[in-house]
Amino acid sequence: MCISIFLAACAHSGGGDTPSAGKQSLKRDYWGHRPGPKGFRTVIIDAGHGGKDSGARGHGAVEKDLALDTAKRLKRKLAGKFKVVMIRSSDQFVDLDDRVAKANRYDSAILVSLHYNSSRSRSTRGPETYYWRVDSYSLAWRIQRELAKVSPSEYRSRGLVRRRLRLTRNTRIPSVLVELGYLTHASEARLCRSAGYRDRLASALAKAISEQRAHGDTGTGRLPRPIYKPLSKASDPPGS
Ligand SMILES: [Zn+2]
């Protein structure tokens, strides 16, 4: 709490942790305290994990493979409507900070990072969409709403979560991280292993992205309050 009050004070006085004292537009980019994106041209798709990093495993499913497959499906659905950039297109390891750096090369863009989840509890299930910045809220809201129509276990968008992660905090563009389902839940893992189900998930993501481009924040409710916290680091405790 003390840290966020200190940073808020610094930000308002134009100094401290901000990289661009006195420059309002850069400051808003740095914190992400601005309206959600509308009319953007580029969608950056980040298939989570890859190479030596397999991500979650469960019931015969491997996260890095399902994430890449879903990313390719989403790319095909967005092709012709958006410029699409893939952070990885093969079974390749990419460091999280390099993913952020690549995303930061684009303007008029959003980042959607795709993952599959795991839990110690075998009964935990359902898609979850993580955002941190104010400018990422409405995109996350739309994505979670569309996933709720596809997933039999999602109910009233309870999976919409505000969390400071490197991929939700450290980019300069609106960014969301989507956990599409729990591989540790037997029946959800079975669904996630099905190409038809992953295709429906990709269609839901594509619909939410297109609606965000057309409507921005309209119809998604009140924007969340700005929170002043520093960039996320690898050494931060999980979920902080
Ligand atoms: Zn993951």
Image (cartoon, rainbow, N blue to C red):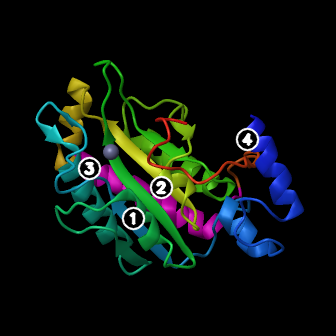
Along the line of sight, the residue nearer the viewer: 70 or 87 = 87
Residue contact between numbered discs 2 and 1, judged by CB atoms under 8 Å? yes
| Residue 225 in the image, given as x and y percentages of width and height | 76, 45
Amino acid under label 4?
Answer: Ile
Amino acid under label 3?
Answer: Arg
Quick check: 22 above or below 123? below
Q: Looking at the image, tell me whether mark 1 or mark 4 is earlier in sequence order.
A: 4
Which region is colored magenta?
197-218
Identify the residue position indicated by label 1 in the image: 99
| Quadrant in which the N terminus appears | top right
Quick check: 32 above or below 149? below
Is residue 204 highlighted in magenta? yes
Q: Looking at the image, tell me whether mark 1 or mark 3 is earlier in sequence order.
A: 1
Mark 4 → mark 3, Cα distance in angstroms: 41 Å
Mark 2 → mark 4, Cα distance in angstroms: 21 Å
Tell me if the residue at label 3 has its CB under 8 Å from ligand 1.
no
Q: Residues within 10 Å of mark 1 (few under 14, many from 20)?
A: some
| Residue 40 in the image, given as x and y percentages of width and height | 57, 75
Residue 88 seen in this snapshot: yes
| Residue 82 in the image, given as x and y percentages of width and height | 44, 78
Disc 4 on helix, strand or loop?
Answer: helix
Q: Give residue 19's quadrant in the image.
A: bottom right
Image mark for residue 167 = 2
Image mark for residue 198 = 3
Amino acid under label 1?
Answer: Arg
Amino acid under label 2?
Answer: Leu
Disc 3 on helix, strand or loop?
Answer: helix
Residue contact between numbered discs 2 and 4, judged by CB atoms under 8 Å? no
